[in-house]
Amino acid sequence: MTAQFRRRRSALYMPASNARALEKAKTLECDVVILDLEDAVAPEAKAEARAAAAAAVRGGGYGERELVIRVNRLDTPWGLADVEEATRAGPHAILLPKVESAAEVQQLDAAMAGRDGGAGPRIWCMIETPKGFLRLEEIAAASPRLACLVMGFADLVKDLRAIDTVDRAPLHFAMSRAVMVARAMGLDVLDGMYPNIRDEEGLVRQCRQAREFGFDGKTLIHPSQIGPANAAFSPSEAEVAQARRIVAAFEAAEREGKGLAVLDGQMIEALHAVAARRVLAMAGER
């Protein structure tokens, strides 16, 4: 895999207004920490949370965890100030909530570019509404900074007037569409959170379902959800062993000047080798 590959099996929301939570995040096994300035922070605490998130990013101590700041929408009283402070702090990405158009992404891109010269954090977009899902292709193509789509299925279920079930049958179209668009645009895509922190069985079912659909990981709201998510989105020992065999067979063929290999009677092409290397990268092998 390329050096840009990152595991995003578990992305934990942490309220930036909670100093203890920010410190605890340094010890957790999640792949991504999302420092939240939006839903988890009361209006009167927005400015303090903004400063705390920026200080946490600058202070470091999060190891290899990917740091993302979820800002408020740009049409709120706090959005532009959030973007300015977050961009200067330099997290890995800025997460924009409730995105419904390419113009919103481009507005964020322009606001960031004015403060970092076009480099710096990537953009992540939360897709949470019917309008957002219907405009997903234009949103996904809106900026070269865009790296990941994040699903907000709780709001979508509400807007659809659907019933929120563990098997998520009313959301299958949206889930498949999100993965399809993400793959077409070369983006990662994360499944929405599971709200019942005491129902590990339900969480595991949804994680496995999301992996079957092709999601790269799941957003989480409690540290207890990290272990099940990491396990569900990690390849099994059998998958890893087979991936090693595929890579070895293809590389041996390449050394002989061949573009194809045969393994267990099946043809192995470059696309199989790419998929196998991704499996190894997901398992933590480089």
Image (spheres, rainbow, N blue to C red):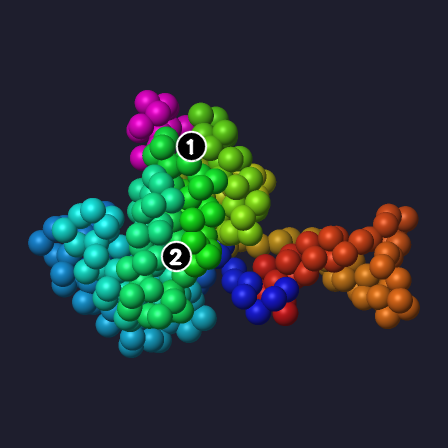
Closer-to-camera residue (67/131)? 131
Circle 1: is it few (<14), some (14-19), or many (20+) Cα within 10 Å? some
Instruction: Work out whether mark 2 precedes mark 1 in sequence or the reverse, and give the earlier one.
Output: 2
Residue 197 horizontal side relative to residue 230, left or right: left
Measuring from the top left, give residue 17's x and y in whole percent. Answer: 19, 60
Q: Secondary structure at mark 2?
A: strand
Is residue 29 shown above or below 262?
below
Q: CA distance from mark 2 to mark 1?
A: 20 Å
> Disc 2 residue type?
Ile
- Circle 1 residue: 134
Q: In this picture, which residue range is highlighted in magenta?
A: 155-165
Residue at 12% x, 57% y: name it.
Answer: 45
Callout count: 2
Residue at 31% x, 28% y: name it.
Answer: 159
Q: Secondary structure at mark 1?
A: helix
**Quarter holding residue 252:** bottom right
Residue at 14% x, 61% y: name it.
Answer: 47
Measuring from the top left, give residue 147's x and y in whole percent. Answer: 46, 56
Closer-to-camera residue (23/16)? 16
Measuring from the top left, give residue 228's x and y in whole percent. Answer: 48, 50
**From this viewpoint, is residue 63 visible?**
yes
- Circle 2 residue: 123
**From this viewpoint, is residue 15 visible?**
no
Residue 8 horizontal side relative to residue 89, left or right: right
Measuring from the top left, give residue 266's x and y in whole percent. Answer: 86, 48
